[in-house]
Amino acid sequence: MSIEVTGVSKRFGDFVALQDVSVSIPSGQLTALLGPSGGGKSTLLRIIAGLEYADAGTVGIEGLDATALPARKRGVGFVFQHYAAFKHLTVRRNIAFGLEIRKRPKDEIRRRVDELLALVHLEQFAERLPAQLSGGQRQRMALARALAVEPKVLLLDEPFGALDAKVRKELREWLRRLHDEVHVTTVFVTHDQEEALEVADEIVVVNEGRVEQIGTPDQLYDEPANDFVMRFLGPVTQLGDLLVRPHDVALSPGADDPDAVAGRVARVVRVGFEVRVEVSTGEQVVLATLTRTEFLRLGVGVGATVSVRVVPGAPVVAVPGSVVRSGLEVPAR
Amino acid sequence: MGRGRGPGRWVARAIVTAYLVLLVAWPLWLVAQHTIADGLDGLRGIVDDPDVVHALRLTVVVAVVSVVLNTVFGVGISLLVVRYAFPGKRLLNALLDVPLSVSPIVVGLALVLVYGGRSGWFGPALESAGLQVIFSTPGIILATTFVALPLVIREVVPVLEEIGTEQEQAAQSLGATAAQTFRRITLPAIRWGVTYGVVLSLARSLGEFGAVKVVSGNVLGETRTATLVVEEKYLNFDQGGAYATAFLLALVAVACIVVVSIIRPKEGPR
Ligand SMILES: Nc1ncnc2c1ncn2[C@@H]1O[C@H](COP(=O)(O)OP(=O)(O)O)[C@@H](O)[C@H]1O
Ligand SMILES: [Mg+2]
């Protein structure tokens, strides 16, 4: 294990930001800290980096107890959401900063910076100031700067959060490829479940200062530990006492299926390739998402009677407290 | 002032310009005019007078020492106020404005009460240790430093607040010590704030009169500073000398500010 966080708690005044958090992060992987904003992700990342200190608990990095070490001795590269570019230094000097601090020979620094400039595709911008770069370029510079000192772990706090959607998508694919090249243990914070599912090897779901679940994207998606994780990873709907994903809800015409709940089609909305069917079972409104082909094969319209059931083997989670109410759920963000 | 509303904008501009001309530019111009009215005799007269030269030199020494003190402590206090939370911070903040709000003459009297050689609270002890403060150069430096204290701080604090802490944290995570972070990251980021504060302090220190008058004892050729020379000459009907000295003082101060506004980058962070 590369990063070992054990029993970490952190308060800001009366506010509990982290509560007895334990996480093990494996070497060489790309791990996402995923959760709603305000959940404590940044605080956890900053405690790992030594930019914040825990009230209780320990932090180990590559087998070394780092709990009391200052940030500069942890061998950690940190990338901030808003780049934290050194505004008065050129791109080259920004990237060279950590090496200059370590008093490396001039020609070694030059060589290493050239390599990194190539790695992040900023060769022709080496002599520019950060103010003359776009957001995406600044963030790549910040990444190169953090990698320059060959950190044991690389920590990124919502690295693409300040960028527009298109650049963000490009950069996260690029980050994935970069990681496959460089292989440094990387942890990045995001509140975007799609980003985490797409990029990460392993996801830690953090909510209200606690870890809700740790697992691979598949594990999280197929075996959500609780209703929070289920809701956070995508749209859900409720059938009886169960939370289920709308595309795992199956409909059949008529009311003669004894294992299914009977209902009436209340609304049909077509969005591109998918058709959203709302079925009223009397006490609930259940959402089913079908492909266009499935819907046409079903051959029903608004007002028709249908049987509703969960596709066998689909992940379901019991609703805590199980007060049955009508409910369409949108993904928590 | 609505942008683009023609007449309103011009009226506002005219009022502001007239205000500044009547209050600042014209009086200063008259000082210059008086100085050079009879050729350069007035200026030459001053430069030839050893007492005036001594006063000018004293003023420069005092101003330089106070500026150095106020810069070092000003940057330190600014960092403390912006970067750290501690009990009594609001009180400290309020205290920092005192030198601007209290009349310099009160400052002078207060310093005499503390450091006065005979009856001061702290003075006799210092005096027996061989350090005379009041009626001597240390007292003049102390008074000048006190009066110009907030100027660097007021320029640096907003810049520190604006740059935030992320650049410093990034430097630390890259291995920089606190001292390296300050020298390589913080200082370059606040350099224009510091420069402006230094210039304002220098101008203020060169021109300080009230507090210095009380603590210096105004001894000719010893503790008389340039501003005191101006007053002395003016009261003794040596108007030529008074204007010439005043002109020199104003010239240095204005020159500082002009130079800084020229070398300072047009846009971007201070
Ligand atoms: N320095 C701080 N002082 C006070 N409260 C803080 C501080 N840092 C974070 N918090 C609070 O802790 C909570 C968790 O913050 P954070 O870790 O930034 O969440 P996330 O990164 O998941 O959005 C938030 O409610 C935030 O307001
Ligand atoms: Mg955050």
Image (tube, rainbow, N blue to C red):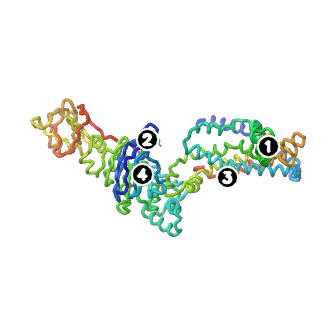
**Chain letter behind tag 2:** A
**Chain letter behind tag 1:** B
**Chain letter behind tag 4:** A
User: Crowding near pointer 2: few (<14 within 10 Å), some, many (20+)?
Assistant: some
Q: Report which residue position mark 2 lands on.
A: A11
Separation of marks 3 and 4 at Cα, in angstroms: 46 Å
Tag 1 near tag 4, CB within 8 Å: no
Q: Do the residues at discs 4 and 2 belong to one chain?
A: yes
Q: Residue A81 at x, y = what percent?
A: 44, 49
Find numbered disc 1 in the image and state the secondary structure of the residue it sits on: loop
Q: Residue B218 at x, y = what percent?
A: 84, 43
The foreground one among B104 and A262 is B104
Residue type beneath disc 1? Ile
Residue type beneath disc 3? Ile
Residue type beneath disc 2? Arg
Find numbered disc 4 in the image and state the secondary structure of the residue it sits on: helix
Residue B27 visible, this orientation: no
Q: Report which residue position mark 4 lands on.
A: A48
Q: Report which residue position mark 1 lands on.
A: B134
Q: Report which residue position mark 3 lands on.
A: B262
Separation of marks 2 and 1 at Cα, in angstroms: 52 Å
Q: Quadrant of the N terminus of chain B?
A: top right
Separation of marks 4 and 2 at Cα, in angstroms: 16 Å
Vertical placement of residue B61 versus B22, above or below = below
Q: Residue A128 at x, y = what percent?
A: 52, 59
Residue type beneath disc 4? Ile
The foreground one among A312 and A150 is A150
Closer to the N terminus: mark 1 or mark 3? 1
- Look at 45% across and 56% down and name the residue there: A74
